[in-house]
Image (tube, grey):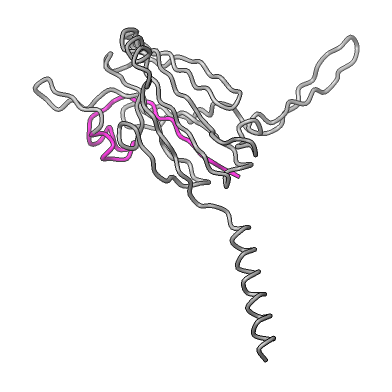
Amino acid sequence: MKHCVLICLIISLFRLTNFTLLAKPDSTEINIQVGFKDSETKLLADLINVEKISVSFSDSNLIGKKFIISQIEYINGEKKKENPLFECGKDTINMKIGDDTIPYYISDPCEKTKYKENDTLYTINFLCDNSEDSSARIHIHYSGFFFDFHISKKENSLYMLRDLFVCGDYKGNIPVNKKIPIITFAPPFEMGGGASNYCILNMKPVEEWHKYYKLNHYVVFYLEIKD
């Protein structure tokens, strides 16, 4: 009888351990760092109005997962078409070589965004050249990708690149397999009397900024960590 109980306990423990190993994480820790930490670099960045936000992860449970970033522009309270930085999926183009047409297979770019086995720190850098009044130049660099594009400023010249957590350095959990807003490029909330505030925007969902803060234009970057 004792042997039977012991065997049953071992089997139960094995099943529990196996289930734990196979269970998919539903959240992971995100680490946000705002600005440049080196004093000389920070001074130079301030002089030329360059902003930086680093988003990093260090979680072995993320091995094999893809990090997909998309951008959505909001105008007068309406969400415009989502603009993924790149499309996932393999593609084929036909190449004309002499009299022959040869299919050329393009690998899935999203495969390159995966958290790899030897990744001890997975980092996505957002940089913004905010020196022009009419537009800003955004750089996004991670895992072998580098994106460079412009965003027009439709409100005023006071737009700012910032995170959507605490408006500064942050460390906390975010869900996996769910698209969430992490970075915005937006003007401040005008409080009246010449006063304005950027961080107060975090008190409401990004979809409601026009309703509560009368913001007519802003851009939000979303991140989805997916299988």
Is residue 201 on the magenta stretch?
yes
Is residue 43 on the magenta stretch?
no
Q: Which residues are magenta?
A: 200-227
Residue furthest out toward the front: 2
Residue 89's spot in the image, x, y percent?
Answer: 67, 34
| Residue at x-position 91% and y-position 11% | 99
- Tell me if 181 is positioned left or right of 203 in this view: right
Query: Which quadrant of the structure image shows residue 117?
Result: top right
Q: Nearer the viewer, residue 98 or 142?
A: 142
| Residue at x-position 59% and y-position 27% | 143
Q: How many marks?
A: 0
Q: Quadrant of the C terminus?
A: top right
| Residue at x-position 48% and y-position 18% | 139
Residue 197's spot in the image, x, y percent?
Answer: 20, 27
Residue 88's spot in the image, x, y percent?
Answer: 63, 33
Residue furthest out toward the bottom: 1
Residue 50's spot in the image, x, y percent?
Answer: 37, 14
- Tell me if 87 is positioned left or right of 155 in this view: right
Query: Which quadrant of the structure image shows residue 93?
Result: top right
| Rendered view: 89 above or below 38 | below
